[in-house]
Amino acid sequence: MSISVSTSPRRGSLKHRAAMTLRRDWQLWVLMLPCLTFFIVFCYFPMYGVQIAFRDYKAAFGITGSQWVGLKYFEKFFTSYYCGRMFLNTFLLNFFGLLFGFPIPILLAILLNQLNRKRFKGFAQTAIYVPHFISTVVLAGMIYLFFSPTNGIINHLITAAGGKSIYFIMEAGWFRPLFIGSEIWQNAGWNTILYIATLTSIDPQLYEAATIDGATRWEKIRHIDIPHLVPIAVMMLILNCGSLLSSNTDKALLLQTSGNMATSDILGVYVYNVGIAASKAQYSYASAIGLCLNVINFAIIMLVNAVSRKMSDISLF
Amino acid sequence: MTALAVKKKNRVRETRKDRIFNGINIVFWIIVLFIVLYPLWLILIASVSDPDAVLQARVLLWPVDFSLMGYEAVFQYSELWGSYLNSIFYTVVGSGLSVIVSLAAAYALSRRFAGKKLVNLAITFTMFFSGGLIPIFLNIRDLGLYNTRAVMILMNLVSVWNLMVARTYIQTSIPNDLYEAAVIDGADHFTYFFRCVLPLSGTIVAVLAVYYGVARWNDYFTGLVMLRDRSLYPLQLVLREILASLTSTGSSDTFFAAYADNLGGLQEALRKAEVAKYCCIVVSTVPAVLLYVFMQKYFVKGVMIGSLKG
């Protein structure tokens, strides 16, 4: 009579360890299941569906049943009349947004950290976060109300000062200032969070030592605060570079008017217009444009990340 | 006595340069706070002023000819209130689900297990690459979710960023010793998660609730793309018609004109609409801002811990 020991392997053996891991881990997988399902169904399914950019999508045949057409829609896009203008508009909107929007939170964080009246500091910190909680629709509504040519407060001030009333929302030259200015107003305060967190984690002994050495506040900022902020700032910069061609479609859609098309005609809005809003939606064409954008954005972020890792040892991954 | 002495000593240590710096800094912050808060104040006072005063831009610092007619008009906009209820539903159910799903996954990702690297990579990848608007839209349609309430709940269920914040929070603020002690006492992951992690995660739950809640309350684009029936519209989509549809100048007037009968004729309805727009902003924004102000205390702390190593 043989006693079967093989079904329960000896403690410490590889098989035993694998079995233990599985027995211990399956609950973790169960906890992750809803989250993973979400990512697979709502993020990875569409990535599979992006093949319609290379097909002539017909609803009757579905995604995989439609005819392959190769690069037809990419060609159509790149040879279209407004292609260059849209690329330029999208890029410039994001580039100027980054140029003006990126340094301001850093500046605010440093100066907030220097406020030595505790209650005022707390109030300021709470207050600058508030605009972040306003919706895009309301923000656009505020722009329409305040910058209205007939009864907006801005134009009342301009005319009171002897100037001529400006139809801000209908002028191409004002689209970027309005878009970026409102973006800064809404999010500059909120974006200080990371920097403030970094500043508060600096060892206070550094400041004490600097004070003993006779450093002024300005010198402390230059030699303590700024070097501590550089790594996180570079990370944020890399992250932001990944969206140089993707823009806030929802906001641009609200601020685009027949008057400012020369600057507000950006790729994201175009994709929405031809793919969703149009009465005869061109799914494959719009997908092709979207895919171009995503690939370019992805390439930029990878490139910037690699360059940064080589040059400064700071990288996202 | 000693505290006072120390305070005095500190004051002496401030050099002249530092005092100038402080002075400039305070002036700077007063200007910043004015820029941030004045537009909000302006909306608030315009919403309780007389339409004529608002149109002539006489409302600058305080309400002029105080009146509540704007709010009375807003009260009549039945479609706005219908969408208000929709938004409450989408926000409460949606963010509740988001918080639960994210927290459970965040806990799992904070532990070590085989395959974790792959999972992390797969999740982070979605942050940098997506199928794009059209494939997402077609996917929703193929799943039969187009024009349903479910799509408003399930779209954007988990945000990678929030997931990372929650994971970092769990990793840094719940000591690993606790896990080891629990395991010795015979706890498995379920027991540990529900009995130890959840009770210690009050702060991060508050933070996630605000993040998800506000994002959902303020979102109009999902509804714009995924909904057709007006009865399913979230608040922001109706607000868009009221506030920001000047692309063709008249279209917001059609919204107001629909309520002319109850508001004393078309002329009067449109006159009141000038103030009602401000009232709509107040009515729609107050919930999000209040949520932030009430949660503020946990909020700043939790976000900072979560973001430090994120």
Image (spheres, rainbow, N blue to C red):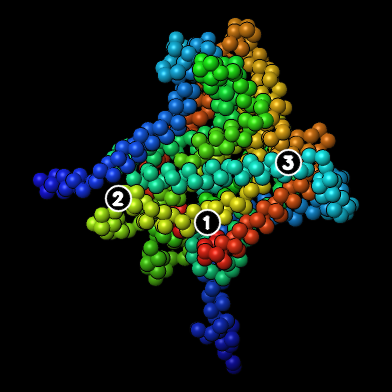
Mark 3 on the same chain as mark 1: yes
Amino acid type, residue under disc 2 in the picture: Thr
What's the distance in space between the residues labelled 2 and 1, CA to CA? 29 Å
Q: Mark 3, mark 2: which one is toward the viewer?
A: 2
Residue A96 in the figure: left or right of residue A50: left
Residue at 28%, 57% in the rendered image: A210
Q: Earlier in the sequence, mark 2 or mark 1?
A: 2
Tag 1 or tag 3, which sits nearer the N-term?
A: 3
Dot 3: within a 10 Å radius of its alpha carbon, few (fewer than 14), some, or many (20 or more) residues?
Answer: many
Numbered circle sitting on residue A164: none
Q: Is residue B28 left or right of residue B92?
A: left
Q: CA distance from mark 3 to mark 2?
A: 49 Å
| Residue B143 percent location from the top left of the image | 73, 47
**At x 45% / y 39%, what residue is drawn?**
A129
Pointers 2 and 1 within a single chain: yes
Helix, strand, or loop for circle 1? Answer: helix
Helix or strand or loop: what does disc 3 sit on? helix
**Residue underneath mark 3:** A86
Chain identity of mark 2: A
- In front here: B174 or B160? B160
Q: Between residues B158 and A262, which one lies in front from this camera angle?
A: A262
Residue B177 in percent (x, y) is at 37, 67
What residue did someone put label 2 on?
Answer: A216
Residue linked to disc 1:
A235
